[in-house]
Amino acid sequence: MPSSTTRTEKLDLRLTRQAKRTLQAAAATSRRSVSEFVLESALARADEALADRRIFSLNHAQWKVFLAALDAPPRPLPRLERLLKEPGFFDAGSHQ
């Protein structure tokens, strides 16, 4: 984690005494403050949780299918087209 980044946000956390002791011990063995240890650990876990939403891998055949889908013309969606043509709730005169 870059040390030159200014931290402007705060996150409060309630935990048990035992959980705090465990975090303090883990931070001490890592030679980090509890804040640094918790932040680095939480960000690593967040990256794991979000990985499949940020990056996906395809083999050659899957890549060709994916590109074909991107290049294909959009399929008609009559219900969406009708919805977009109707006046919205906040449009003038739509809630008479």
Image: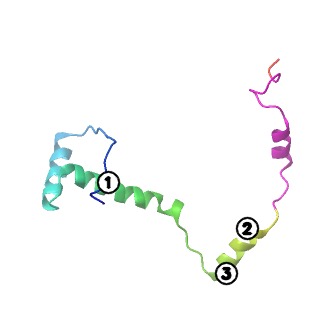
The percent position of residue 70, horizontal first and vertical second, equals 73, 67
Q: Which residue is mark 1?
A: 5
Query: Does residue 83 show up magenta in the picture?
Result: yes
Query: Does residue 91 show up magenta in the picture?
Result: yes
Query: Which residue is situated farthest in the bottom direction here?
Result: 60
What range of the chain is rendered magenta? 74-94
Q: Within 10 Å of the Cα at label 2, are there few (<14), some (14-19), or many (20+) other Cα atoms?
A: few
Horizontal relation, residue 34 to residue 9: left or right: left
Q: Quick one: SS at disc 3?
A: helix
Q: Earlier in the sequence, mark 2 or mark 3?
A: 3
Quadrant where the image shows the N terminus: bottom left
Whether pointer 3 and pointer 1 mark residues with C-beta atoms closer than 8 Å, the reply is: no
Q: Earlier in the sequence, mark 3 or mark 1?
A: 1
The percent position of residue 66, horizontal first and vertical second, equals 69, 71
The percent position of residue 69, horizontal first and vertical second, equals 74, 68
Q: Quick one: SS at disc 2?
A: helix
| Residue at 20% in and 46% down | 19
Quadrant where the image shows the C terminus: top right
Q: Quadrant of residue 28?
A: bottom left
Q: Which residue is mark 2?
A: 70
Whether pointer 2 and pointer 3 mark residues with C-beta atoms closer than 8 Å, the reply is: no
Label 3 – label 1 distance at C-alpha? 42 Å
Q: Quadrant of residue 68?
A: bottom right
Numbered badge on residue 61: 3
| Residue at 17% in and 61% down | 30
Whether pointer 1 and pointer 2 mark residues with C-beta atoms closer than 8 Å, the reply is: no
Most prominent secondary structure in the magenta stretch?
loop
